[in-house]
Amino acid sequence: MKHIRNFCIIAHIDHGKSTLADRLLQTTGTISDRQLQEQTLDDMDLERERGITIKSHAIQMRHTHKGQKYVLNLIDTPGHVDFSYEVSRSIAACEGALLIVDATQGIEAQTISNLYLAIEHDLEIVPVLNKMDLQSADPEEVSDQIIDLIGCDIEDILPASGKTGMGVDAILEAIIDRVPQPKGDPAAPLQAMIFDSVFNSFRGIIAYYRILNGTLNKGDRVRFFNTGKTYNADEIGALGLDLLPCEQMGAGTVGYIISGIKNAKDVKVGDTLTLEENPCDAAVKGFEDVKPMVFAGIYPVDTEDYEELRFSMEKLQLNDASLVFEPESSAALGFGFRCGFLGMLHMEIIQERLEREFDMIVITTVPNVSYHCFSKKGEKTVINNPSELPNPSKIGRVEEPFIKAQVITKGEYVGSVMNLCIGKRGQLQNQVYLTSDRVELTFSMPLGEIVFDFYDKLKSVSRGYASFDYFPDGYQESHLVKLDILINGDQVDALSALVHRSNAYELGKKICAKLKELIPRQQFMIAIQAAIGAKIIARETVKQVRKDVTAKCYGGDITRKRKLLEKQKKGKKRMRQVGNVEVPQAAFLAVLKLD
């Protein structure tokens, strides 16, 4: 065990984690130059296209240092705030972390948030200053920021460049010297934590684990602690670029197990794996349940695909444990699922993955958050969908979730960032100058306000220089109303939203105007209305397509024309009573991008 090191890489998005991981794999000879490609560990097309890491990836490297062979288990993690659950799981399986900071950009919001996660788990932090080959690098100032943040010495900070490979040997040396060896008792009963799992259509579910105590042999009968299911360990081994089977895995190692599990519900990420004959006493602690931030409905375009969508979501949940879903039905869209996501990017990625990996084309409803509704008698109900809100006459008060938002930006953009946050009902709580030109602003604001397009707007007002991170801060009472959209007098429940009364008129007007552009014209007039309860607050009209019924009339008296027009008027009236308006799929998506 003293020759094993388990470490992960944490950083803000786009600070060069995956590129540096490539250099580490190359230097240790884990992959040949022929196998190497940009972002080797990012195996999804989606990750390559967007240049971001979505999944954390584990891989084993072997390195010789001072004549002694070492096994290094690396877990590369995502940097975006929406995938912080992946980071928390990776950190739980490690003893050390490489904290990578871009020498041109300095410390950003997600750097701080991931660092605190690592410190909570008592990880040894190895600070690395990346992108030192760039002319715009400012190592002195960024080093000062790192020293202020973690209180290390300037000699502890390793200069490196993922692009040129500078400083990689020093990083490997620091991992071996600074990161502690895994603790654990090989003779104790087996206790292993499952930190990830993937679905393989030929071999069933492959679970990745980190053994804390005990030893696992091939062919052992294993039990999952929470679900109580038992299986044979048909194949166990280490994680290289491919799976590397072996006969025995000892304490402190990271590996995989294949036991022919077909049902996705039998494997829970964060569960404890133990032997059936000699089980451990307690499950592994330090694993929190995921807290979804944004809720939206996902519906199949064709109702017949509902079961297929369920299977696809279950397989996706294996690979992305932060996805939460439950069945629901809607009058406009039929049967579907109410899903919980960690943020808007997470929601977008899930939708893309369903389309690419499972060929499922889905409709997503307007995203919202969950509210607490108290009746006049004081009974509390949780509202995940605006259609669940009771009659306004029975409501005592409604509480909405608030967050504490941290924005780090350059001094010159402070005014525009403040305007944006205050416009979203935020309240400034703190303002700290990290350096002469970098400011950390702390706001308390409603989560419902950042669900739509807050992140995009923040990037545009700060010209891409602001970084953003948030965490939940309880529920507070708000003056919320339910905004309904009526088309031809019929309510479209998929477009309903719970909004603050001050924003209702503005939002209703925008949605009506957008729908007017998207709903095709019919033979009859269509009224699009936004309403709060019985009160209509905005209206747009889609004019009817007119057929010229008087074309066949030539000459003669005006009464002949009038007679034909009256006949047409009656027909239009009857048509409006029985006519159905199809709302196109584009309309549901366009509401998300109103500005």
Image: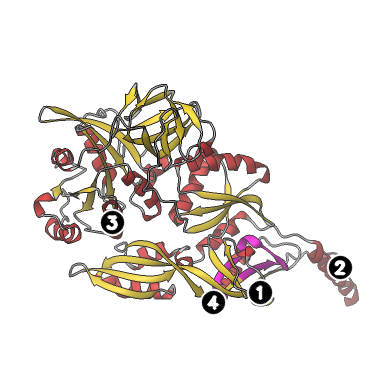
The answer to whether the residues at label 3 and label 4 have Cβ atoms under 8 Å apart is no
- For the residues labelled 2 and 4, the Cα–Cα distance comes to 59 Å
Q: In this view, does 324 lie above or below 175?
A: below
Where is residue 563 drawn, in percent x and y? 89, 72
Label annotation for residue 553: 2
Position of the N terminus by quadrant: top left
Q: In this view, does 162 lie above or below 455?
A: above
Q: In the rendered structure, which amino acid carries the disc numbered 1?
A: Lys
Q: From where the camera sits, is residue 41 visible? A: no
Q: Dot 4 lies on which element?
A: loop
Q: Position of residue 379 (x, y in %)?
A: 60, 69
Instruction: Give the mark nearest the N terminus, 3 or 4.
Output: 3
Q: Residues within 10 Å of mark 1 (few under 14, many from 20)?
A: few
Query: Which residue is denoted by mark 4 in the rendering?
Result: 479
Amino acid found under the numbered disc labelled 4:
His
Q: Name the residue under label 1.
A: 394
* Amino acid of disc 3: Tyr
Dot 3 falls on a residue whose secondary structure is helix
Cα distance in 3D space between marks 3 and 4: 35 Å
| Residue holding disc 3 | 116
Query: How far apart, in angstroms, are the residues tagged by discs 3 and 2?
Result: 82 Å
Magenta-tinted stretch: 483-504
Say which quarter of the image contains residue 173: top left
Instruction: Name the residue nearer the viewer: 379 or 308.
Output: 379
